[in-house]
Image: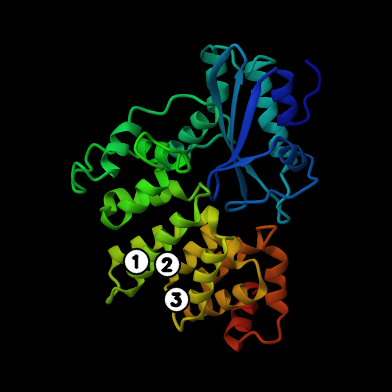
Amino acid sequence: MDTIDTISQLLHSSNSQFRLYDIGRKIEKISKEHFEKIELNQMPYPTPSQGHACIAIAFWQKQSPQPFLWLLKLPLDERGLLNQGARNHFIAIIVEALGADLTQSVNKDQEELLKNNPYLFTPAQYKLAALNSKIKFELKQEPSEYLSPFLSYITGSNGWDNWQAVGVQGITDFAVRIREETSIEKNSELLINALPYLPSEVLLPLCGALENEVFSVDLINALLNLFKEKCKLSPTTETNMQLQQHLLRSLASNCQHVHVEKLVAELLQQKHVASELLITISGRCWLALANDEHLMAFFEHLVLSDDQALFNSIFKDLVSIPAIRPIVFQCMRAPERSAALSKAIGQLFN
């Protein structure tokens, strides 16, 4: 076997077909061209999560359409560049265990080597369900058996309280098909009609699945309207705050849409924004903060929480994102920043 320097080379040399996904902040496809540049440290990892690149690699042979799956967690340096030593160590373990045939059946020794690979990890179950749905959809494979019961439920014909037959896998199968038409109507229209009636047991996991999808402006507006309704409820209960967080989270892949940006701007113009919503904005809708006015307002709200540990955590998270990093530095130097923000930034370096 020739020298293998990158994961891309490893996959190509085994004659595998493959697809790559970021599974850190949300589930998003990574192009092969971008991944090769990431591996060669020609560009930083675009969506780091706690100092790591969290990557799913689905690969298969032409004669066998059922993909194998690697779930990797590789460390990044402070600039967001891939740790080459860790990547090389991962490749060495794979080559030792499998050689050139990545899709072979493994014996006990090989299985033990693969199990002890320190760069493989298990994401949360909801992410695994969403990833499974996305891979099957993109490879034009049949959805799970749970999609049909969910489609039946979301018509409302069986009653909104009868959600017990709904499975998370059915919800994620529906979410990846949000722009498709069913035999009844468009999936997005089905959801828009159902949104006011969905109990939290269905709405919360549905929002978690929608965060990975780009969808119609009508659905964006329906989710925004429901969010605004929940914000008007007083007093804010723990359950209602959880609903607000999830509704905001559902818009993650659409957070650069003008309507979502406007909502975030309006939130940041308020006198008080709950810490829970600030965490959701930075963790899921960070691209809505990609201008100095929004980001400065965000940091000013963050210091009002009077929680230096929270400020440090979110600041370090945002400064690690290549698209946001230069704007963070602008805010650090901005002469109009408040004394409280200046103090919080100063304590970062103490």
Residues at circles 2 and 1 in contact by the CB criterion of under 8 Å: yes
Q: In the drawing, does residue 270 fall left or right of residue 293? A: left
Residue to which mark 2 is pinned: 276
10 or 212, nearer to the observer: 212
Q: CA distance from mark 2 to mark 1?
A: 8 Å
The numbered dot on residue 322 is none
SS under mark 3: loop
Residue 102: x and y, percent?
Answer: 63, 18
Residue type at the position of mark 3: Val
Mark 1: give few (<14), some (14-19) or many (20+) Cα within 10 Å: some
First in sequence: mark 1 vs mark 3: 1
Colour convention of the picture: rainbow
Measuring 31% from the left and 38% from the top, which residue is drawn there? 150
Task: Give the residue pinned by disc 3.
Answer: 273
Can residue 127 be seen?
no
- Could you classify mark 2 by the number of other residues whose Cα lies within 10 Å: few (under 14), some (14-19), or many (20 or more)? few
The answer to whether marks 1 and 3 mark residues whose Cβ atoms lie closer than 8 Å is no
Residue kind at label 2, given as amino acid type: Glu
